Amino acid sequence: MPTFLELPLLFATALIAGLVDAIAGGGGLITIPVLLGLGLPPQLALGTNKLQACFGSGSATLSFIRSGTVKLSECRTGIIYTAIGAVLGAATVQLLDPRLLRQIIPWLLIAIIIYTLLSPRMGFEDIHPRMRPAPFFITCGLLLGFYDGFLGPGTGSFWVVALIFGLGFNIMKATGQTKVMNFTSNIASLAFFIACGSVLWREGLIMGVGQFIGARIGAHLVITRGARFVRPVFVAMVLAVTARLIWQNLHAK
């Protein structure tokens, strides 16, 4: 278990992760290796990570709502079905081995990178939606909520591209609504970890404070800097998540 002297490290790690995650997702790439490196068993590391992540996604959500970037009335359906999907995913991970899904996801993330790079104006402005909001949120809420509860890496990236491609959002609005969905699935998944006793409360709450502060800074940067700032950070984080998953797959073999 982390010692008292290691708690400032956890706080600083969470602050940086919260900042990065609010902009482009991928904060778990920073926090989970640190938790594991301090000797936490995987289940405890994942549960504690979900606790602190709730603070970051909740903080970013509040910032986007207050700025007017996100209106909860527009994503109520998504919140409901994302919560259902996350609960189903968290329950399923107790029964199935996620290794097969972990091998597929990097290829989907590579497709996102290629699509983003080949669409230089993607996310700079709203475009005509390809789907109506209700069927979009029911489908993506269940699928991406399930994935976040079951495995997790890259969920934010999938949400951003889905919102841009399906509903025609610009990247700022897509990032804001992604944080709402992340917060929803984090809360739903955390409930399972709490029920299993797989959360370190002291460490998680200290990290939560760092996450809250970092996410406020990250959301402010998104709101004030716009698409030209968010897009390259988004691509960089998708690349990082992809590389991490490929490394894990090779290491597992």
Image (cartoon, rainbow, N blue to C red):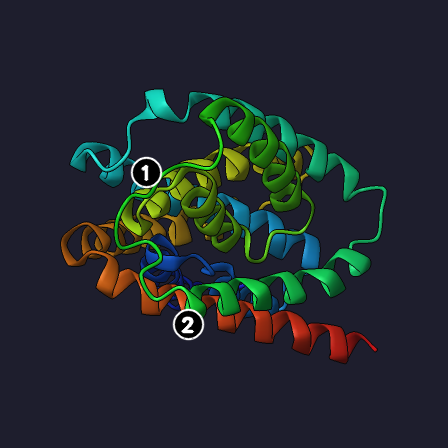
Callout 2, which amino acid?
Answer: Ala
Q: Quadrant of residue 214?
A: bottom left
- The quadrant of the picture occupied by the N terminus is bottom right
Mark 1 is surrounded, within 10 Å at the Cα level, by few (under 14), some (14 to 19) or many (20 or more) other residues, namely many
Residue 145 as seen in the image, left or right of residue 63: right
Residue 64 drawn above or below residue 110: above
Whether residue 6 can be seen here: no
Identified at 70% across, 38% down, the residue is 89
Q: Contact (CB < 8 A) between labels 2 and 1? A: no
Q: Which of marks 2 and 1 is in front?
A: 2
Identified at 46% across, 46% down, the residue is 165
Residue 53 drawn above or below residue 58: below
N-terminal label among 2 and 1: 1
Identified at 58% across, 65% down, the residue is 111
Please tell me which residue lies in front, 114 or 176.
114
The disc at residue 50 is none
Q: Quadrant of residue 178?
A: top left
Task: Give how far across and how far down residue 226 sits, in percent.
Answer: 20, 56
SS at circle 2: helix
Task: Give how far across and how far down residue 221 sits, in percent.
Answer: 20, 57
- The quadrant of the picture occupied by the C terminus is bottom right
Identified at 43% across, 21% down, the residue is 76
Determine which residue is flagged by label 1: 61
Residue 87 as seen in the image, left or right of residue 61: right
Callout 1, which amino acid?
Answer: Thr
Q: Quadrant of residue 60?
A: top left
Whether residue 129 can be seen here: yes
Task: Give how far across and how far down residue 20 sits, in percent.
Answer: 35, 62
Determine which residue is flagged by label 2: 236
